[in-house]
């Protein structure tokens, strides 16, 4: 799977804040994702992390001094400011923000920032009084107006012992912001496409404590949402109860029952593609009890079932908002192809992704699927659910190219 961050070039400027140590973790994680990192350590930054730690992690020289003959001969502040696709200042101290806002260029970091023609992203961190100070807030406004991307500091316990806004954003949030930046700036194949995906199981309540459910983990649907998101699509993920997380840029709508899933899916229209991956429970309990059903001395409680809405068919036959591409999933334990073809015709959808659930598909990491359309039946090899997601994404990209 191609990582959005793979091969990207980022210059990280590490300022003199107590949170500078978190930058080491940030660098390590970005490196793991294939990012090529150059770094500048300010005089303040040097007080909190060592140049050796930074250069060991970036596997490159860390630049520190504007007037160093070696640094200038090797890279030079102008080259440093131009050679990268993004400049990230983290931690961005009050001092650095003030210098950036007023255009001061008195060291390598500030001179590089002033000379830069590339997008600049800052992750401020400081004591909450420093953050709230009108001077800092004014500098923040100036920087934002100039197009500087700001990863807002979080609220909570601060290193100085006070509580307030000023904590460096969590490393994973900084990475997500960087990822969103690259996603929105690249020419991705599904940019501008709106895609709805349903995923996970639905729960149908018997009473306030009991419900009917199935073994769906949501992994396949979530993997598809992520793969399409990486191609720039605007994703709405309508999910039944699962314990999975998704990228911040994906709009997630949590639902419990099939009827809730139906109304959330309709609400997400118009869409360019709807993919119904969720394992929707076929029935709901018509005589759902308001209070917990007590164990009866004689006999068993009787549950009256009623049919749930057919989400796939409703979307595929939608009168006003039928998406150009509607894809359904069919989990079958026998006669896979035959049942999948029947489903394709009866639901009026465009493609069926059929999987044989006689193995460990539900909850497992792998999936072996067939793609059934009105023209063909393709068998894909057994592979990771994330790889199925990437292959399906490629097919969707191709569908729009051919249109
Ligand atoms: C222990 C300690 C922690 C500090 N933490 C911060 C901080 O989190 N944010 C900040 O803006 N300044 C902080 N400062 C003050 C900066 O280090 C100081 O303003 C320095 O000049 C900033 O250097 P820079 O411009 O290289 O970032 C701290 C100072 C000390 C002594």
Image: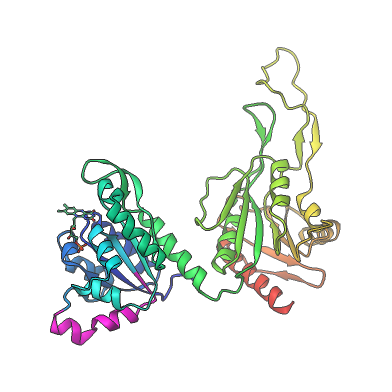
Instruction: Please give the name of the residue rendered at 24% of the width and 40% of the height, measured from the top-left corner.
Output: 162
Q: Is residue 1 visible?
A: no
Q: Is residue 155 left or right of residue 276?
A: left
Residue 367 quadrant? bottom right
The C terminus lies in which quarter of the figure?
bottom right
Quick one: 39 or 280, which is closer to the camera?
39
Q: Position of residue 326 (x, y in %)?
A: 75, 62
Q: Position of residue 77 (x, y in %)?
A: 24, 80
Instruction: Please give the name of the residue rendered at 59% of the width and 59% of the height, measured from the top-left corner.
Output: 225
Q: Position of residue 74 (x, y in %)?
A: 21, 85
Residue 321 quadrant? bottom right
Question: Is 307 contained in the magenta span?
Answer: no
Instruction: Please give the name of the residue rendered at 72% of the width and 79% of the height, measured from the top-left corner.
Output: 402
| Vertical comparison of 332 with 145: above or below | above
Q: Is residue 148 left or right of residue 243?
A: left
| Vertical comparison of 336 with 59: above or below | above
- Give ligand 1's quarter of the image: bottom left
Q: Is residue 126 left or right of residue 317?
A: left
Quick one: 59 or 140, which is closer to the camera?
140
- Residue lying farthest to the bottom in this orientation: 73
| Vertical comparison of 117 with 216: above or below | below
Q: State how the image is colored.
A: rainbow
Quick one: 90 or 325, which is closer to the camera?
90
- Residue lying farthest to the top in this orientation: 297
Q: Is residue 354 visible?
A: yes
Residue 113 quadrant? bottom left
Instruction: Please give the name of the residue rendered at 33% of the width and 77% of the height, measured from the top-left corner.
Output: 116
Q: Position of residue 298 (x, y in %)?
A: 74, 13
Q: Which residues are magenta?
A: 67-87
């Amino acid at each position: 799977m191609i990582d959005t961050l793979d091969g990207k070039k980022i210059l990280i400027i590490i300022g003199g804040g107590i949170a500078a140590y978190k930058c080491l973790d940030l660098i390590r994680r970005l490196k793991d994702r294939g990012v090529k990192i150059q770094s500048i350590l300010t005089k303040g930054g040097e007080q909190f992390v060592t140049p050796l730690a930074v250069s060991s992690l970036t596997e490159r020289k860390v630049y520190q001094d504007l007037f160093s003959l070696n640094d200038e001969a090797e890279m030079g502040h102008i080259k440093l400011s131009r050679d990268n696709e993004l400049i990230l200042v983290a931690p961005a101290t009050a001092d650095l923000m003030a210098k950036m806002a007023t255009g001061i260029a008195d060291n390598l970091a500030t001179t590089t920032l002033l000379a830069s023609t590339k997008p600049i992203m800052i992750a401020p961190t400081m004591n909450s009084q420093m953050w709230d100070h009108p001077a800092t807030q004014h500098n923040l406004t100036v920087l934002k107006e100039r197009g500087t991307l700001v990863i807002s500091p979080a609220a909570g316990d601060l290193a100085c012992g006070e509580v307030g806004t000023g904590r460096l954003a969590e490393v994973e949030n900084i990475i997500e912001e960087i990822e969103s930046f690259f996603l929105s700036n690249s020419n991705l194949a599904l940019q501008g496409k709106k895609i709805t995906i349903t995923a996970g199981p639905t729960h149908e309540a018997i009473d306030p404590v009991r419900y009917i459910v199935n073994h769906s983990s949501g992994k396949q649907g979530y993997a598809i949402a992520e793969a399409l998101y990486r191609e720039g699509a605007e994703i709405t993920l309508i999910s039944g109860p699962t314990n999975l997380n998704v990228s911040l840029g994906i709009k997630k709508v949590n639902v419990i029952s099939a009827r809730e899933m139906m109304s959330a899916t309709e609400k997400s229209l118009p869409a360019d593609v709807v993919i119904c991956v969720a394992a929707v429970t076929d029935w709901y309990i018509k005589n759902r009890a308001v209070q917990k059903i007590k164990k009866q001395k004689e006999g068993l409680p009787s549950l009256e079932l009623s049919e749930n809405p057919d989400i796939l068919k409703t979307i595929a036959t939608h009168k006003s908002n039928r998406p150009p591409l509607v894809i359904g999933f069919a989990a079958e334990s026998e006669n896979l192809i035959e049942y999948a073809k029947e489903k394709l015709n009866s639901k009026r959808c465009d493609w069926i992704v059929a999987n044989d659930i006689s193995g460990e598909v539900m909850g497992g990491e792998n999936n072996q699927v067939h793609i059934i359309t009105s023209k063909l039946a393709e068998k894909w090899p057994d592979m990771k659910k994330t790889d199925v997601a990437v292959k399906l994404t490629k097919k969707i990209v191709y569908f729009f190219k051919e249109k």
